Every structure is written in structure tokens, then in C-alpha cells.
Image: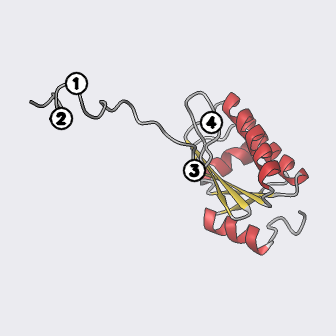
Amino acid sequence: MTGPSGNGPAGIGPPVAGPPVAGPPVAGPLGGHGFTVPVLRLGDILLVTLQGELHDGMAEQLQQDITERISHTRVTGVVIDISGVDIVDSFLGRVLAEIAAGAGLLAARTVLAGMRPAVAITLVELGLTLPGLRTALDVERAMEMLTAGEHQDGGSP
């Protein structure tokens, strides 16, 4: 006689599977409150992909996490892909500039990739210049800038 699962005698056999247990994250997601920001290490570059709305607390945590990650992994560049972000307010703009400043102090350059035209217009209207933060149209160009050592802002590191 077999048990309800058909795998062997009643009460014997493999245990009923519960929810899957995930191992350590390969990409190294950052963030909290049920929200993760995927971070991939590609050689000497961290790729941070922002999707949707990033609340203030999560933005501050992301800033701290990226700085720690740069320090521990000794990467030389950070690409922040914001192609999935619809709105960048003054707070998030300031956090992005602070991430770039912190990365610069740790000898890593930061490139902001994938900015939508509406986001660019909003940043200009808010008067945010994002000092120390280079921009690229997409992730591919941002990676090229960092690997080739190019500086979009005229040569300052």
C-alpha cells in the first residue's frame, strides 16, 4: 500500500516539500523591507539595477551597502542603472550624488546609466546637477566608460 504521495508505504518516504530555501544570493541583493536591489559584480565593476520606486530609507541603506561593498571587494567602478525608475526626486538625486562621492573617496568611479528623458528634465527643473556622477545612455556604454577609463565630464576622476 502506498501513501498519499504514491511514493511508498503510508507514512514512509520523502518528506512533503515546504517552501523553497534559498542559498546565499549570487548577485548580492541589497536593501531591506522585502525590497532588494540586485547588485552584480562584473570584474572590477558593480552593476546596481534600480527598479520602480526607491523609498527614502531604502535609498539610504543602498548608499551604505554600496559603500561597504566597494570597500570589501575593491572594485574600481559602479554602474547604477536607473532605466527602470520613473521618478527621481530631489532626495534620490542627492543620494545618487552621495553614492558617487563616497565611491570616489574609495577610488571607484560611478556612472549613472539609462536615465529616461522625463527624469533628466525633472532633475534640471529641480536644479540638481549631480556632481561627480557621470552619465551614459545605457549600461553597455557605462561599462565601456569605466573599462576604457573615459571621463564624460572632461577628465576629472
Discs 4/1, front: 1
The residue type indicated by label 1 comes to: Gly
Extreme-top residue of the structure? 11
Name the residue tied to disc 1.
11
Q: SS at mark 4?
A: loop
Decide which of tag 2 and tag 3 comes sooner along the chain.
2
Decide which of tag 4 and tag 3 comes sooner along the chain.
3
Name the residue tied to disc 4.
54
116 and 105: which one is in front? 105
Snapshot colouring: secondary structure
Is residue 93 shown above or below 44? above
The residue type indicated by label 3 comes to: Val
Q: SS at mark 2?
A: loop
Asked where in the image residue 141 lies, by quadrant, the reply is bottom right
The residue type indicated by label 4 comes to: Leu
Would residue 8 be found to the left or right of residue 143 on screen?
Answer: left
| Rendered-image quadrant of the N terminus | top left
Dot 3 alpha-carbon crowd within 10 angstroms: few under 14, some 14 to 19, many 20 or more: few
Q: SS at mark 1?
A: loop
**Residues at discs 2 and 3 in contact (Cβ within 8 Å):** no
The residue type indicated by label 2 comes to: Gly
Q: How many marks?
A: 4
| Rendered-image quadrant of the C terminus | bottom right
The disc placed on residue 8 is 2
**Residues at discs 2 and 1 in contact (Cβ within 8 Å):** no
Would residue 38 be found to the left or right of residue 129 on screen?
Answer: left
The x and y percentages for residue 107 are 88, 57
**Residues at discs 4 and 2 in contact (Cβ within 8 Å):** no
Discs 2/3, front: 2
The x and y percentages for residue 80 are 68, 53
Name the residue tied to disc 3.
26
Distance from disc 2 to disc 1, alpha carbons, whole Å, reads 8 Å
